[in-house]
């Protein structure tokens, strides 16, 4: 199943600014494009996180795919360094895996953030998209993210991870373990571990595509197809 949608538009200049704490909290939860949730509805763990604000862009509603890629290239080092503070090995290595989207795209299932799809060598069948079949144990998928607010402020978003575990780990979820690492490197939740209840929404969403091994795929017009898809990384 496809997810997200590309964002049309024009080029942009960049300049500096400061964003208030209310909008910062919104970015962590909703991607910066909707009204903020009431404080009582936001998990305490998220409220404590201070996301990294990078810079501001003009015309955020009109960003092209290449604009999004330019933003991503500028913030990627900072994003991965922060994710790596979690101690999770994949958070430090995923950017060296194959990326299956040409440019970052907005994902409705990830709070309207811009996301990128990476897969490790054991998950290389992901590049076959709807024909991928079931992933083997050890397959890892990573999706980093960033948000651009209605005012144009650019913030790091969470890193979403899916790992195929041993048979029997979680049969209702096709044995996937979901993890979510916040922009400051803190662990929001992990299936079967700390904050497991906080990633139940991951299970519920991916269960909608159970016939495709619970996998969502890159929008068709944004897919990267490798000539040697079966090659190891």
Image (tube, grey):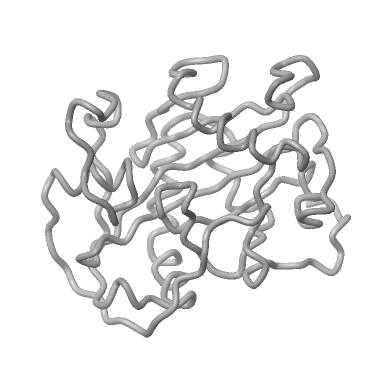
Horizontal placement of 213 versus 22: left or right? Answer: right
Question: Vertical placement of 38 versus 94: above or below?
Answer: above
x then y, percent, for residue 13: 27, 81
**Within the image, what quadrant is residue 120 found in?**
top right
> Who is closer to the viewer here, 159 or 105?
105
**Within the image, what quadrant is residue 70 found in?**
bottom left
x then y, percent, for residue 227: 84, 69
Residue drawn at x 31%, y 61% as measured from the top left: 148
> Who is closer to the viewer here, 74 or 148?
148
Question: Vertical placement of 43 versus 142: above or below?
Answer: above
Residue at the extreme front: 208
**Within the image, what quadrant is residue 212 found in?**
top right
x then y, percent, for residue 28: 31, 42
Residue drawn at x 47%, y 33% as measured from the top left: 180
Question: Vertical placement of 84 versus 226: above or below?
Answer: above
Q: How many marks?
A: 0
Residue drawn at x 48%, y 77% as measured from the top left: 66
Horizontal placement of 127 versus 30: left or right? Answer: right
Horizontal placement of 46 versus 134: left or right? Answer: left
Residue at the extreme bottom: 10
x then y, percent, for residue 8: 44, 78
Residue drawn at x 86%, y 56% as measured from the top left: 231
Question: Vertical placement of 160 versus 196: above or below?
Answer: below
């Amino acid at each position: 199943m496809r997810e997200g949608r590309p964002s049309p538009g024009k080029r942009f200049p960049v300049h500096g600014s400061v964003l208030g704490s209310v909008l910062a909290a919104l970015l962590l939860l909703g991607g910066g494009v909707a009204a903020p949730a009431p404080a009582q509805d936001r998990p305490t763990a998220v409220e404590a996180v201070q996301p990294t604000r990078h810079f501001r862009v003009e015309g955020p509603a009109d960003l092209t795919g290449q604009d999004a890629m330019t933003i991503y290239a500028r913030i990627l080092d900072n994003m991965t360094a922060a994710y790596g503070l979690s101690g999770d090995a994949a958070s430090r290595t995923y950017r060296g895996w194959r990326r299956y989207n040409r440019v970052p795209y907005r994902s409705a299932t990830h709070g309207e953030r811009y996301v990128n799809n990476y897969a490790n060598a054991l998950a290389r069948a992901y590049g076959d998209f709807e024909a991928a079949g079931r992933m083997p144990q050890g397959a890892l998928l990573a999706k980093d993210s960033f948000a651009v607010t209605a005012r144009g402020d650019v913030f790091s978003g969470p890193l979403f991870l899916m790992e195929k575990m041993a048979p029997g780990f979680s049969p209702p979820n096709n044995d996937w373990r979901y993890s979510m690492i916040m922009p400051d490197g803190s662990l929001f939740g992990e299936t079967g571990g700390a904050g497991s209840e906080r990633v139940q929404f991951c299970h519920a969403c991916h269960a909608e595509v159970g016939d495709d091994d619970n996998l969502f795929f890159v929008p068709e017009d944004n897919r990267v197809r490798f000539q040697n898809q079966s090659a190891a990384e």
